[in-house]
Image (cartoon, rainbow, N blue to C red):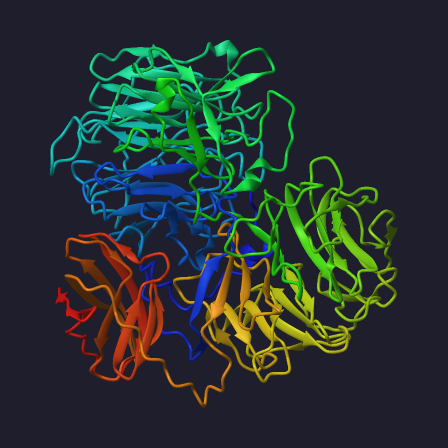
Amino acid sequence: MRRTRVLTAVLALAAGLLAGGPPALAADTPQPAGTLAADTYTWKNARIDGGGFVPGIVFNRGEKDLAYARTDIGGAYRWQESTKTWTPLLDSVGWDDWGHTGVVSLASDSADPDRVYAAVGTYTNDWDPTNGAVLRSTDRGASWKKADLPFKLGGNMPGRGMGERLAVDPHDNDVLYLGAPSGHGLWRSTDAGATWSEVTAFPNPGNYAQDPSDTSGYASDNQGITWVTFDESTGGDGSATETIYVGVADKENAVYRSTDAGATWQRIAGQPTGYLAHKGVLDAENGYLYLAYSDTGGPYDGGKGRLYRYATATGTWTDISPVAEADTYYGFSGLTVDRQNPGTVMATAYSSWWPDTQIFRSTDSGGTWTQAWSYTSYPSRENRYTMDVSSSPWLTWGANPSPPEQTPKLGWMTEALEIDPFDSDRMMYGTGATIYGTENLGNWDSGSKFTITPMVRGLEETAVNDLISPPSGAPLISALGDVGGFRHTDLTKVPPMMFTQPNFTSTTSLDFAESDPNTVVRAGNLDSGPHIAFSTDNGANWFAGTDPSGVSGGGTVAAAADGSRFVWSPQGAGVHYATGFGTSWSASSGIPAGAVVESDRVDPKTFYGFKSGKFYVSKDGGATFTASSATGLPAGDSVRFKALPGAKGDVWLAGGASDGPYGLWHSTDSGATFTKLSNVDEADTVGFGKAAPGASYQTLFTSAEIDGVRGIFRSTDKGATWTRVNDDAHQWGWTGAAITGDPRVYGRVYVATNGRGVVYGDTSDTGTDPEEPEEPEEPEEPGPSGACAVTYKITNQWGDGFQADVQLTNTGSATWNGWSLTWSFANGQKISQLWNGSPTQSGPAVTVRNTDWNGTVAAGSSVAFGFTATRSATNTAPTAFELGGQACAVR
């Protein structure tokens, strides 16, 4: 289930000051970074597989097995057929442009499958400070260029499941259309997405808003132009398609058409009214435009719906709905045509929350329908399918519902539904929690059951609120939005179940007893029920606590160092404390409601709090707090702080806003005084990990701006110096919620993202003295051998540095499973950062190997990476490249 995601105030206030745009989004000229130390990290996700709403799935109709998925807050992904996984494509979105992780639409160019486009932006109101953009790629999303738009886009706004709003002309693929929200109308590009202008001839910018009275601007926004569909039977190669259909968020005027390549537009006569057209899918072979209608914009709401078929040659409208209007309590949205058998059409009842979603199928162009499940004798039902969620067992939610509900559910918010255009047996559909699919869909028609499984591995879409890594037990326990959270005993495997007993809709805070890591506490949100839970076995099993009066949300919670007591600052009530496991709570004094609370990691009677620029300390187990006399701390509430394990009174505080104090502070006297680190410009999180070899103080981690660069940083010397551990290809938008190191693995860091799940990084740094580096290992033999071509392009230069992009093309006949490209620099150039590859350099010799997600390169396909490097006055481009000892052609 995906609820409205609103980041904390720090997100809007703390406009990141990244020096230049991230290289993979090359709209602006990158600036040279400061003289920061950097480490090469390997980044992965702690596997959850899914966890959020997938409103769009797009198959390329020109190339088999090429597909993309979009998420509302977590970026876009490309399907990797060889591994049946999804590859993230927008990890390069930086702090400053965090809203561009929301994807409102995707378009894959069937005439040139290397081209893909993404319309990005998360909110159209002031929650997102930046305008939207259209990203364009000529290497399937490995790198992007950006065209900024003069308005905002809403990847996480109401109506986000409608679409696709972005479309490529199948006959002239330099022409694209984009449907805009907020009354901005229809837009067109004639240069492959580089520039955009409004189609002023289009007559209707839409008028539907979910709730016009919403003063936040979220539900009151005009949902605008909702989809664009080309009729490929009109026009010809090299000339723009003549007939174009456009959907509009207007219940009386939902569908328009142009028959002169967009020069003029007319409302289609005879169309149904009283509904919004969520999708418009054309079967050009039979001359039918299919439309899925709902009485609202979704993705949560919708009480009535219809399916219609429009005959493009005769103008005849036919109601082909599978059930009578009186029998619908849902709208229709998911809609697809089998391109191998165009008379086969499928649709979803996207807003049928109870007892389950429904999927309909017709093999006679909507004349008759069958459905995925039906009642035999209420409440018993018969399914045409079986579900196997063994790869993501948490999708059962640990539930045991009464019929007619079942677990796992077929889904909810099912607005994305696609039959593979090259394989009638394969279908994928998005839900509020995952992507489901089948590879034996034909069984539907033969009367035997087809199997539905999660097809979501690699797509990680959770918003992370808090993270802990205890010194024993599970290495990672997470607090997540929508799906509550997980206990990871193995980061490479999907946990069997989210937190249950109770199931919070969102977990807001986690803590454990430092000297007894089996004692864990979590606080969270629940529509009805307790807001706090406890575990005595390191988070494996849970039991609910009791709420004090007035609690309305989870807030923050802290466990005493020995687990003997807890302090809780819930929403709706003031700060409270309890001995034991929260069966009885008492109000704390001396601290304001809404304060963030944490515990000292040594003294079980010492707790800390922060609210509105003031730091508070309790020495009696949370009963009374006293305001510290420390001054100069952040004035607002965008603050996160932690006490250091093993050192009484050692506290680190991060936070602030761009219009006031902002940075990282340290106290060694339980918050009586704080010292601001002068070498940290801005900081939003702080966490601790295992000390470096030979170091006596634990490793610090922070999401911060240091020396003018936004990133994830590590210090092994108590903050005296910092090393950036991420790179411009791994930024993940906003990372300001939580961070923690691993107390058992030096260098490992866990980073909270807002839509890309929990990412963790492992260092290549062994902790040796940088003045005495280890001898470099001999590089592995480059492989594979095969025909290849390389394009090396310097994209930017400054005084002592430059940026370059490299494209490696498989010009042979066999697929590469792993690659390693070598070359030598002629003028002493030295790589400082590289993305989409793993580099080593010894003197002038450079080797770049594939990452774990781009090693498979099919014949005729390309892979791309980029880097920044230092240079002297001369910067000669390499003229010779080798793959597996064989020379590559240089283009």
Query: Where in the figure is residue 169, as x and y percent of width and height?
Result: 21, 37
**Quarter location, residue 250:** top left
Mark yes or no: residue 424 visible: yes
Residue 665 percent coordinates (x, y): 65, 73
Left or right relative to 790: residue 541 = right
Q: Looking at the rendering, which quadrant does residue 107 occupy?
A: top left
The C terminus appears in which quarter of the rendering? Answer: bottom left
Residue 775 drawn at (x, y percent): 38, 86
Identity of the residue furthest to the front in this view:
448
Q: Is residue 756 above or below residue 634?
A: above
Pinpoint residue 838: horizontal percent, then vertical percent: 35, 68
445 versus 185 height, above or below = above
- Quadrant assignment, res 662: bottom right
Image height of 134 relative to 654, above or below = above
For residue 320, side relative to residue 517 (left or right)? left
Q: Which quadrant holds the N terminus? A: top right
Q: Is residue 297 visible?
A: no
Q: Which sits in the foreground, 243 or 91?
A: 91
Q: Is residue 857 above or below residue 390?
A: below
Count of numbered labels shown in the rendering: 0
Q: Residue at x 78, y 73 (%)?
A: 629
Q: Nearer the viewer, residue 166 or 866?
A: 866
* The one of 415 and 850 positioned closer to us in this rendering: 850
Residue for point 40% across, 21% down: 448
